């Protein structure tokens, strides 16, 4: 028995045989073309073939994995047709007189390396897509076929899994996924989460494990090859208990989120994409308590336009099936910076130029976002939430910008609904002067993640101070109690949307303090509901 430790990607468990998916694309050596015109023609034909196949794969995958993941194939088709990529291939063929296959491989390598070196994890993980389209093109040029057929349920093991490769497989036969390379944002990871399969990464794969029995422990990030009887029995028991627990939680779905004494506690979801919103609806969320809109900025090379935002907010409203949605304005800066923003280097980014501070310093994108939110309110119940507030003047300024934009839209005859405004309490200052803020808003939402780090002077991402970062600290609890009391005195409701809302060891205490609503990740909703239903 050997136990190898990696990084947990999705917290599930499975026992089964390992199947090794070997890397099938060796490095292509530089080769001179006999006829460059012929190579150019071959490249264009390969492009057309690959784009056609990608459209087919998109159609086949929609029923298997849903529109959002399948959309990867459409993105790949666009990448294959990208002018910069094709331009580089064609100019290499023309000027260096190399074969189309070599020019494609070299171009792919160039872009993949460029992306892999970027700081932003989103762009880094996009280098996988470049590698995959490059492999598809070289396969088409060289006439290679790499179809993998799974004949029995297996734990897949690979150096890395290309997104398309993973989606093409028969999912009913995948028990788990083990990779060497990959990240939490990789497609294999997203797919594992969507399919609720155990997944770990960072494992140095050995081809001799192919066909051997293994345990994949996605909770602790372990791969156990050739488990002994005792280990296997203990995991079988864990899997049995987990299944029972999942059944119990699934039974919560149709039940109301109400305490034993009959107090209703709206159970909302924190989401960061349209796909998350759909997952939230499936998990019985009564609405979206926090839509983190930063995802709209991190992938692009400019702020999303008002129209693009409006479309996304409408998609979120429809994904959550008409339930209320709270849209938080861009919480950019610190660890969430888009390359196009060219933010300054800062010594203390969390104490720096971030969130509402950027919105108030660079007003136009903020105004566009408010207009998109106001326009979205014509299509459903929409609230807006402002992050990182620390002073009354900010909320006054926001209020006048909000009124100006609303008036501007109404004067132009654009339909807008009633948008409730809320302030996030995530700085100690906002908590202390909460009485000054609540007259300007309809609700407050306590962001315990930042509130904890600022109250306890302990960076939420720094492992060295992790023991100091304690959301249960009395200082945090007393601050929440103070905010609830102050807001209630002004007739303003309070929700908690930080991770503490998902922590069932804190639920009873939050309800005792009078917190009105909880907003947590979709995956945590069932256990929070079970806990609320057990409270007096
Ligand atoms: C928080 O700070 O608690 C919060 C919900 O915001 P984020 O985690 O996005 O900073
Ligand atoms: Mg925060």
Image (cartoon, rainbow, N blue to C red):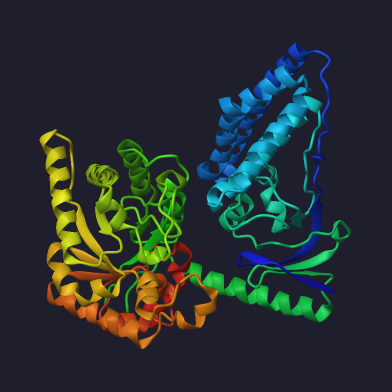
Quadrant of the snapshot with the N terminus = bottom right
Res 397 seen here = yes
Q: Position of residue 62 (x, y in %)?
A: 56, 40
Res 323 seen here = no
The residue sitting at the bottom extreme is 474
Residue 284 vertical position relative to residue 461 in the rendered view, above or below:
above
At 15% from the left and 74% from the top, the residue drawn is: 435
At 49% from the left and 69% from the top, the residue drawn is: 461
Q: Quadrant of ligand 2?
A: bottom left
Q: Is residue 398 left or right of residue 28?
A: left
Q: Position of residue 334 (x, y in %)?
A: 42, 60
At 14% from the left and 39% from the top, the residue drawn is: 408
Residue 515 vertical position relative to residue 45 in the rendered view, above or below:
below
At 71% from the left and 15% from the top, the residue drawn is: 41
Residue 454 vertical position relative to residue 139 in the rendered view, above or below:
below
Quadrant of the snapshot with the C terminus = bottom left
Q: Is residue 387 left or right of residue 153?
A: left
The quarter of the picture where residue 157 lies is bottom right
The residue sitting at the right extreme is 208
Q: Position of residue 346 (x, y in %)?
A: 42, 60
Nearest the eye: 63 or 300: 300
The quarter of the picture where residue 164 lies is top right
The quarter of the picture where residue 130 lies is top right
Q: Position of residue 465 (x, y in %)?
A: 50, 79
């Amino acid at each position: 028995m050997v136990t190898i430790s990696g990084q947990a990607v999705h917290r599930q468990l499975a026992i089964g045989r390992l199947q090794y998916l070997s890397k099938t694309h060796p490095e292509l050596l530089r080769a001179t073309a006999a006829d460059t015109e012929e190579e150019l023609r071959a490249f264009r034909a390969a492009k057309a073939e690959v784009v056609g196949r990608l459209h087919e794969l998109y159609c086949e995958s929609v029923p298997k994995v849903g529109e959002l993941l399948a959309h990867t194939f459409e993105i790949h088709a666009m990448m294959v047709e990208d002018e910069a990529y094709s331009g580089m291939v064609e100019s290499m063929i023309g000027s260096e007189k190399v074969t189309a296959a070599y020019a494609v491989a070299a171009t792919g390598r160039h872009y993949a390396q460029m992306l892999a070196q970027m700081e932003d994890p989103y762009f880094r993980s996009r280098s996988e897509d470049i590698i995959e389209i490059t492999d598809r093109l070289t396969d088409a040029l060289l006439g290679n076929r790499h179809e993998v057929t799974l004949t029995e349920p297996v734990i897949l093991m690979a150096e890395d899994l290309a997104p398309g490769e993973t989606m093409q497989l028969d999912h009913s036969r995948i028990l788990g996924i083990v990779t060497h390379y990959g990240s939490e944002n990789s497609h294999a990871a997203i797919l594992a989460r969507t399919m609720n399969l155990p997944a770990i990464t960072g494992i140095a794969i050995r081809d001799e494990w192919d066909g051997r029995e293994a345990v994949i422990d996605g909770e602790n990030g372990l791969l156990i090859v050739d488990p002994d009887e005792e280990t296997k029995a203990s995991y079988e028991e864990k899997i049995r208990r987990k299944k029972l627990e999942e059944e119990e939680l699934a039974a919560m779905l149709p039940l109301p989120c109400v305490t034993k004494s009959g107090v209703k506690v709206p159970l909302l979801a924190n989401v960061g994409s349209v796909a998350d919103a759909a997952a939230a609806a499936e998990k019985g969320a009564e609405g979206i308590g926090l839509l983190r809109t930063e995802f709209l900025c991190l992938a692009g090379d400019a702020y999303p336009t008002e129209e693009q935002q409006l479309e996304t907010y409408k998609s979120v409203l429809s994904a959550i099936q008409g339930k209320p949605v709270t849209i938080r304005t861009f919480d950019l800066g610190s660890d969430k910076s888009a390359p196009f923003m060219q933010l300054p280097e800062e010594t203390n980014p969390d104490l720096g130029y971030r969130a509402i501070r950027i919105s108030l310093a660079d007003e136009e994108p903020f105004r566009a976002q408010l207009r998109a939110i106001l326009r979205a309110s014509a299509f459903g119940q929409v609230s807006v939430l402002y992050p990182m507030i620390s002073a009354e003047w900010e909320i006054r300024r926001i209020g006048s910008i909000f009124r100006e934009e609303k008036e501007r839209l109404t004067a132009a005859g654009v339909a807008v609904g009633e948008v409730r405004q809320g302030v996030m309490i995530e700085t100690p200052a906002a908590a202390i002067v909460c009485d000054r803020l609540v007259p300007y808003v309809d609700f407050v939402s306590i962001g315990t993640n930042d509130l904890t780090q600022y109250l306890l002077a302990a960076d939420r991402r720094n492992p060295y101070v992790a023991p100091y970062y304690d959301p249960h600290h009395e200082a945090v609890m007393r601050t929440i109690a103070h905010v609830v009391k102050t807001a209630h005195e002004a007739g303003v409701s309070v929700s908690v949307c930080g991770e503490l809302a998902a922590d069932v060891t804190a639920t009873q205490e939050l309800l005792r303090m009078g917190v009105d609503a909880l907003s947590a990740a979709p995956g945590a909703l069932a256990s929070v509901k079970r806990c609320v239903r057990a409270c007096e």
